[in-house]
Amino acid sequence: MKAIRGISVDDLRNFVNRHLHKYAVALVLLVICVFLSVTTDTFLTKMNITNVLLQVSMIGIIAMGMTMLLVSGNFDLSVGGIVALVGVVGAKAINSSGLVPGILIAVAFGLALGAVNGVIVTRLGVNSLMATLGSGLAYSGLALLVSDSSPIALHGSGLRDLVKAELLGIDMPILVFAAAIIGATWFLHFTVGGREIYAVGANPDAARYAGVPINRVRFLPFVITGGLCSLASLILIGQLNTALPDAASTWALQVIAAVVVGGVSIAGGKGTVFMGTVGVLLIGVVNNGFNLENLDTNYQSIFTGVIIVAAVAVDAYLGKRAALATSRLVSADREPSRGPIDSEPAAGSVGLTGSSGPP
């Protein structure tokens, strides 16, 4: 094959195959945004963009934790139950102890609920899907029990004022979402702990032989997700000034759908915070587009379902292509005359030191 400045066509093809799955959804999001900006007069307005970000902020905050969980090879179907239970407990704590102590109690309680999930999965050896399905039902039932199946109104407007506050013209829920993105990016892509999560998700046996503490690595994302659920719950009850015991009943599926649509693999070991964020934004923009185009909202769920199935199918297909491209590059590395342009380690390899970022 012809070479361009020392780079062969095969190298270029392999490079594209290995990286297409990382940015394909971002390209789809860009195309949809361009389409909506051309066909509507309001899509690119500050009000509409703010509205989209506010609508996805709570799901997006939890999605950062779910991204870590999926990369580690686990699920969490209890996030809706955590949001509901933290909401009613947090509302009672704020009413009885004040705003700041109540917020701290709510966050600590969310972390504790996440830790319970982590113990069930890592110590008892229960499959994360079934474990969090059961704990989610338990948390939802406890929320109804603690609240006597009735909404709990907040005394005063302290939390509502905090949630509706702005900093540099940006709403507080959006700022918390942005902070969650930055924090998750730093931890997952720039720390040894993050690289251990990738190693465990990609090949737990190899990670164990490399000395990675498997249970600790799998435990931590559950705790982080529980803490992020508590932040989302506080935003929700602040917006409503009321804690609803049956709130967030469908959030688990929404969060997982957004992360998977973004390209994070349900098989573990592959995915980035960028992918999870793009998935959240894509779902939000699609829902917003239905409203702006005056389309029948009954088709939103159908369209979202089709996107999820397509995303999983494309992930499987591109994953195979990426694995094939990787094997070709490994073979090319053994030939002195070849000069591949990508030195990313092979999929499934265990590397806990060196440059940051996902394997």
Image: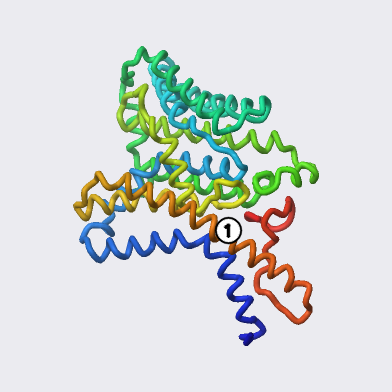
Looking at the image, residue 269 lies above or below residue 216: below
- The image position of residue 82, as x and y in percent, is 47, 27
Decide: is 279 above or below 149.
below
Q: Nearer the viewer, residue 179 or 266?
A: 266
Judged left or right of residue 185, residue 335 is right
**x then y, percent, for residue 2:** 62, 87
How far from the left and from the top, in percent, is residue 72? Answer: 62, 43
Residue at 69 percent of width and 65 percent of height: 327
How many badges with numbers are in the image?
1
Q: Is residue 155 visible?
A: no
Indicate left or right for 239 with 22 as reference: left
Secondary structure, mark 1, is: helix
Residue 309, percent across and down?
A: 43, 50
Classify mark 1: residues with Cα within 10 Å, few (<14), some (14-19) or many (20+): many
Residue 289 placement: quadrant: bottom left
Color scheme of the displayed model: rainbow
Say whether residue 120 is visible.
yes
Residue lying at 72% horizontally and 54% vertically, measured from the top left: 349
Q: On the picture, is 153 further left or further right than 295?
A: right
Quarter of image, res 8: bottom right
Instruction: Check disc 1 and report the residue beneath it.
Output: 319
Quadrant of the image containing the C terminus: bottom right
Camera-side residue of 178 and 193:
193
Identity, as a three-letter code, of the amino acid under mark 1: Gly
Where the N terminus falls, by quadrant?
Answer: bottom right
Q: Is residue 321 above or below residue 351?
A: below
When the figure is inspected, residue 19 is found, relative to residue 261, above or below; the finding is below
Seen at 21% across and 48% down, the residue is: 296
Report whether 335 appears left or right of 257: right
